[in-house]
Amino acid sequence: MIYRLIFLFSFIIPVHAFSSSAISHAPIGVMADHFHKKGEWMVSLKVTNMEMKKNILNGHSISTKDILNQPNPYSDMPMTMDLGLKMPKNLSVIPNKMTMKMIMLGAMYAPSDKLTMMGMLMFNDKEMILDTYKGMMDRNYIGSFNTSSSDISKISFLSLYNLYQSEESRWHLTLGLEQGLGESSKKGIVLNPMNMKSSITLPYGMQSSDKALRLLSSITNVSKFGDFIIGNQLAIKNIVSKKNWNFGNEFQYNLWLQGSFNKSISYSIRLNYKDQDSIEGRDKSIMAPVQTSNPNNYGGQTLNLGLGFNTIFDVFGGKYKDRFSIEILKPINQDKNGLQMKDGLTIQLGFQKML
Ligand SMILES: [Cu+2]
């Protein structure tokens, strides 16, 4: 009888119910969305796939012909070190498709109910298909080529401080550091506008990291409204120390609404707004008649809409159930700086397990 009462009681305490149902974690694309109770451990694996196609100039679509008429900021520079040829006056290489894959390994541990520690290690794999055109005269298409990079990209350590927690609402503050680890000056073979293969330092966007150290801070609120949950998160990333160049500072706002089909399956709709500065500084060896070698063609504002599902099942056994999540993000507005590729769909898959 007493066990039955305890069992029943454990379901009446809302905080407990909150943490053992699918809805208790935010959509998988939101980072550091929840904290843990004293002594709890959690490990996680997240895989992200993002595709980009076509190009936009200051947020508006642009034709191949118009891209080929854009000035090349490095037109006075030599094309290759061994030949006396100069670079074309206009852009001559056009990104056609880019695929980015990210794998994130994470661990969380709560030394107390007030504090949760979190560590993450990120790997990325980038691939780009580009089309090369003649640098002058008829500007005809010459051919296409691939560049790629694959490396550890960054490591981060965060602490989440539980500011307030009630049955209906919780607030927490996150502070942490992120260190870029991957290679920042990887070379690749390209097809240049003279129809020759040459080895160059790949443009910024193809590098695995900028080797910078960043301060991450965010504030998160999750509130219950009947059977629904509304979550809010403001997050910023600021450069603390950097090498000769770095990707710009970042501001993100997430707003999500979640509902449940049952205790094991929840769904979510999320709005994600991101504003990132362009690249600061430059790598003098990055010079090519392609938009991505210009530090101004990075950053900008994007608004994404996400649809996601969280599930909990008992697959691998253990004291706690296994949590599987998926979220698909679709850009609804892209106001990127300068000339950039257009974001396509982002798919995120996650696995989380408390130990
Ligand atoms: Cu966790």
Image (spheres, rainbow, N blue to C red):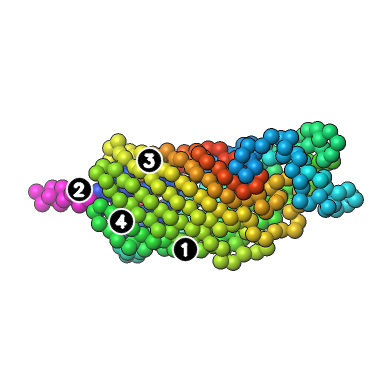
Does residue 177 appear left or right of residue 135 in this picture? left
Q: Dot 1: few (<14), some (14–19), or many (≥20) neighbours within 10 Å?
A: some
Residue bearing the label numbered 2 = 11
Q: Is residue 345 visible?
A: yes
Contact flag, marks 3 and 1 (Cβ < 8 Å):
no
Of circles 3 and 2, the one toward us is 3
Residue 161, above or below 328: below
Q: Dot 3: few (<14), some (14–19), or many (≥20) neighbours within 10 Å?
A: many
Of circles 4 and 1, the one toward us is 4
Q: Mark 1: which secondary structure?
A: strand
Specify the amino acid type for callout 3. Ser
Of circles 1 and 2, the one toward us is 1
- What numbered label is drawn on residue 170? 4
- Marks 1 and 2, how far apart at CA: 34 Å
- Marks 3 and 1, how far apart at CA: 27 Å
Specify the amino acid type for callout 2. Phe
Q: Dot 4: few (<14), some (14–19), or many (≥20) neighbours within 10 Å?
A: some
Is residue 281 on the magenta stretch? no
Q: Which residues lie in the magenta part?
A: 1-14
Residue bearing the label numbered 3 = 268
In this view, the residue farthest toward the right is 84
- What numbered label is drawn on residue 143? none
Q: Quadrant of residue 350?
A: top left
Q: Quadrant of residue 259?
A: top left
Residue bearing the label numbered 1 = 176
Contact flag, marks 1 and 2 (Cβ < 8 Å):
no
Specify the amino acid type for callout 1. Gly
Q: Quadrant of residue 93?
A: top right
Q: Earlier in the sequence, mark 4 or mark 1?
A: 4
Rendered residue at 52%/41% (across/down): 333
